[in-house]
Amino acid sequence: MESKEKRTDVNELGEFGLIDHLTKEIVLMNPSSVKGVGDDAAVLDYGDKYTVVSTDLLVEGIHFDMMYTPLKHLGYKSIVVNLSDIYAMNAKPKQVTVSMALTNRYSVEAIEELYEGIHLACKKYGVDLVGGDTTSSPQGLTISVTAIGEVDKDKISLRSGAKPGDILCVTGDLGAAYLGLQILEREKRLYLENPGIQPDLEKQDYIIGRQLKPEARGESIDYFEKNKIVPTAMIDVSDGLASDLFHICKQSNVGAFIEEGKIPIHPDTEKKALEFNMDPITTALHGGEDYELLFAIDEKDLEKVRYMPFVFIIGEVIQKSDGIKLHTTGGNIHDLKAQGWKHFEEKKENREN
Amino acid sequence: MESKEKRTDVNELGEFGLIDHLTKEIVLMNPSSVKGVGDDAAVLDYGDKYTVVSTDLLVEGIHFDMMYTPLKHLGYKSIVVNLSDIYAMNAKPKQVTVSMALTNRYSVEAIEELYEGIHLACKKYGVDLVGGDTTSSPQGLTISVTAIGEVDKDKISLRSGAKPGDILCVTGDLGAAYLGLQILEREKRLYLENPGIQPDLEKQDYIIGRQLKPEARGESIDYFEKNKIVPTAMIDVSDGLASDLFHICKQSNVGAFIEEGKIPIHPDTEKKALEFNMDPITTALHGGEDYELLFAIDEKDLEKVRYMPFVFIIGEVIQKSDGIKLHTTGGNIHDLKAQGWKHFEEKKENREN
């Protein structure tokens, strides 16, 4: 059924290129469709507030490996990564739907474990599981989650509102989730080579936890509300700080710089990166799956943000013509590259609302 | 990671049993969550109207076979089956999100064809594609669609509102989609046995079209609006008339009877069923994937429905204690059985909102 005339490999376009390509001609028809493809979530106008909707697919063998992913954690994470997209709109998630396709290799008890994690995340974040679909699959497990939330119309944070002079902040340390994946992959290789070996996961709880059981930054949204801050632009760090900063810059039509010395890196992350012969800054810039919020605020809100717990001021929004730069601790200025998806393909995380 | 103590096969519970099992303890927390799992769509309260949300997964090798499914039709159908769920709430669909996981066996051109069908359905039904996710997959193609619509609060039709004395109606003929699948499967077998053979699909357009390119009954919802009819209960016929009637009866706590002689069957369907040595009535009762609307109306609306185009009055809602019955043309009364999913497992269609 595929066209015989021309065959372009999907990897030539990359995920974002593909989405752009397939959706570039969409003209929204309904008044209730405020913002479509291209942000963390779609924005709908169904009343006094905006309704935001985000959807994600998690595929076995791509986004998770059953060899080292406890089902309960997987269920939890599948919810959290979607809620993170809702928070990235400065919205509060209220409902989720969960669909899954699975082979009969999964028993009812296994699915119960998965749902235990799903219910746990729903409870923790105060969202209702309101629907879904369960179907069989010829291979593996695929989980599709759609999250729905709401936000006051004047409080929504798109990716497109950053302006020169805005301050760039991130809600927590970066790079750990990526290193957690490296540890788990290494242990898997060792186990496959020698099934008698016991995994050595001691003192790596923090890093591995960031990979297997991430949390979404709902408390940041509460803080914004309480302190009357509306980020001028916001995105969740799923593809990596650099890649996600590029999304903001592209959609806001601005440039940015980041101070290398200000990028938050957990001591465990730093140590483990060196053990893997990786530059800790590189893992923080390009690792992804941290589910922290990267946001820009107007300069006038700087004092309010200074007292925000778990927030790191890492850079500034500048003119587009000034580019997207990294100011190194050594005093040099480098062009920042968005290497998220293509570069770290083995990372196997590629998402768009 | 699966529990070693007990292993219950998913097929023991069946799809509906599994969903019930996994969601039975859910208590909705948010005031905006009006109705959760268990109808064609979830019902949310985000303003003056209800927002309804429905989601479906279509999995290659389960819901479709690339050997005989043109990608454009597949894209079209993936949207339509979700819109059908929205219409089944007496709501109007406004937005969809589309996520897909696919192997690199699919070229960009192939995905373009798929999206051509998606865009075509969106245009025809007046819905906006507002988001999604594209990711790689180790095997095959999985499409996840979430549809969002709205309905005036006093006009929503749940599955639970039917009462004894209500009239049961269906919006079009039944059984063709199932037979279309049988034809396509037969041609596939013949082709695999002898690849030189040309498929004989002549004069089977109607039946095959019902399988490959179904439509959703938006015009029925328009008619209801124009004629101030609110069905007391409604569902779309995706699992089969009998199975879907059982859903209404269970949730409305009623019984029902259907007049065998009133079940609408297209002449092509009847002829083809006999060719396959099947009872046409059986295919209509249990075939599924017709995407017609099965609805109940109050007796007082009978006159209005009589003039509704493409509507067939097929039975009546009765007391629960009177059971769910088929009145045969021969004057007998049989218990109706809900055989949709389990019985027709080879049909490979199993869906819940």
Image: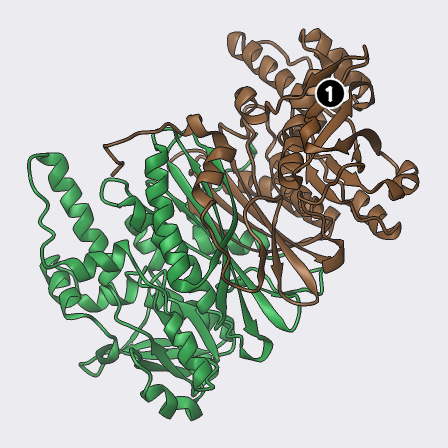
Chain colours: A brown, B green
Badge 1: how crowded within 10 Å, few (<14), some, or many (20+)? many
Instruction: List x then y, in percent, for residue B341.
Output: 36, 55
Q: Is residue B213 left or right of residue A187?
A: left
Q: Nearer the viewer, residue B219 or A267?
A: B219
Where is residue A296, by image quadrant?
top right
Residue most extreme to the front: A321
Expressed as whole percent of the image width and height from the top left, the position of residue B66 reads: 28, 40
Name the residue located 44 percent from the left edge and 32 percent from the top edge. B137
Q: Examine the rendered structure and indicate whether residue A43 appears above or below residue B66.
A: below
Q: Nearer the viewer, residue A316 or B23?
A: A316
- Report the front residue among B316 and A94: A94
**Residue A22's quadrant in the figure?**
top left
Q: Where does the image place residue B180, in percent across and percent down from the top left?
A: 21, 56
Q: Secondary structure at mark 1?
A: strand
Residue A27: percent from the left, percent from the top?
Answer: 48, 55
Residue at the image position 61 percent from the left and 59 percent from the top: A44
User: Can the viewer see residue B323 in this picture?
Assistant: no
* Residue ID at (29%, 72%): B172
Residue designated by label 1: A326
